[in-house]
Image (cartoon, rainbow, N blue to C red):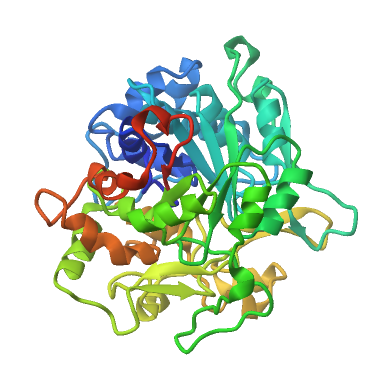
Amino acid sequence: MGIAISDWKLAKTVSQLGYLGVVSGTAINSVLVRRLQDGDLDGSTRRALKSFPAQALCESILKAYFIEGGKSKDAPYKRAALYNLKSSKNLLQLTMVAGFVEVFLAKENHTGVVGLNLLEKVVIPNLACLYGALLADVDYVIMGAGIPREIPGALDLLSENKVASLKVPVFGASAGEEHRTYFDPAEVLGTEFFKPLKRPYFFPIVSSSTLALSLKRKSTGEINGFIVEGPLAGGHNAPPRGPMKLNCLGEPIYGSRDAVCLNEMKELGLPFWMAGHYATPAQIKEVKASGAHGIQVGTLFAFCDESGLEPNLKKEVIAKILAGENPQDGWVFTDPLSSPTGFPFKAVRLDHTMSNEENYQKRMRICDLGYLRHAYKTPEGGVAQRCPAEPVDDYVKKGGLLEDTVGRKCLCNALMADIGMSQKQSDQSFEKPLLTAGDDLNNLMKVLCISETGKNYHASDVIKFLENMCEPAALRHTTPSITTSP
């Protein structure tokens, strides 16, 4: 759900149905500028921009990116600048506004609760996106793909309109050397636009009770609950504990050490929700009996009418499932190499997408979005960034290891293509999608069976399928049982 699959439309729908709807904040600046270049045909983005406190800033964004009626389909998208340890003020402003827009639209004209999901691995844009979300009164923040120990304290500071910073891991840095990225609301927004801000609840995503305990004890601020995510969830998975071993299909092997003890989670005294192949009424009942407050759902929502997934991709997957098609090795492949993060990444097997290795080898290797770049120490003592999915020669020239480039794929461009925003590159090719899903894809037929057409379905159909084992409506806003996944 990482880049605008769980967009404001889906999150708003789930929230209005009485549960916690979550918008993705990953690459949200690129999502905003591409929506504007596509013409913002329903006017939603521009309507949200009119509600942002600094109108001169929004006017400059519109001037730079908005195209009346939308760009030509054959024209490339204009890109936003790439982030650096110290990003430009304009880029931070764009990111802040983009975070505001997504949350504002998700919360518009109803009283339900809305959350924002970010990735710890994509550290540099996070403060600006968080502050924009706070300006739009976001209720929850959820973060995974790393150990977000500093986020609670950053939320405390940002909610008081104070300067916040996050440590940026830098490969090659000496012991005791620290590099940080900063966000100053006074500089980026301006004190004349300050207002009292609500500090949202914070739920880190964890894969073990040990990590949850460490975060509870050592985080810079208050942890309010946890999302406990197992290896059957879509998107990025935590690596197996111990040495990486692969099965006959080339997937990571998870064992008993990777199973989360729910009794230990319960003993932490904080609410937690289970994620990763728990989306059935029976499993909801089972995990709640073990102390969980409910579940997080991603895959079943990803293919509903309200999600941001490109419509033809939805139709294709649903049609194949209805036809009883099933790849010999299963629909979902957990790829240990494709993500530049180094985390295993789940991909849906579709021949025309980047899950097909032959397709990917034909792609011009380029890193022009840069969200998954790693910071490293240069021989001159500065800090630069590189990505294992960039051109191999470039990566090696920057001091990267050749073996780190093997099998790596540009998730940034592929996930933008998933939402119908495929970039046209200089070789005249268009970026192909790389669809992700968890093992709950196997439950999609059960949802289709209760939809009106049997060929497509709504978010409300997912809720109908699941909610028999959830709290009464009066309790849902205080202890949400179902969330849309990031």
Residue with the most extreme right position? 176
As displayed, is residue 443 above or below residue 403? Answer: above
Of residues 213 and 29, the one drawn nearer to the viewer in this rendering: 213
Residue with the most extreme front position? 289
- Residue 70, percent across and down? 25, 38
User: Residue at image x 54%, y 49%?
Assistant: 291
The image quadrant of residue 390 is bottom right
User: Residue at image x 50%, y 16%?
Assistant: 54
- Residue 484, percent across and down? 40, 45
As displayed, is residue 450 above or below residue 32? Answer: below
- Residue 55, percent across and down? 46, 16
Judge left or right: residue 190 versus residue 277. right
The reply to whether residue 280 is visible in this rendering is no
Residue with the most extreme bottom position? 248
The image quadrant of residue 30 is top left
> Exactly how many numbered labels are in the figure?
0
The reply to whether residue 14 is visible in this rendering is yes
Residue with the most extreme top position? 192
Of residues 269 and 460, the one drawn nearer to the viewer in this rendering: 269
Of residues 125 and 427, the one drawn nearer to the viewer in this rendering: 125
Judge left or right: residue 243 versus residue 451. right
As displayed, is residue 254 above or below residue 226? Answer: below
- Residue 192, percent across and down? 61, 10
User: Residue at image x 44%, y 49%?
Assistant: 296
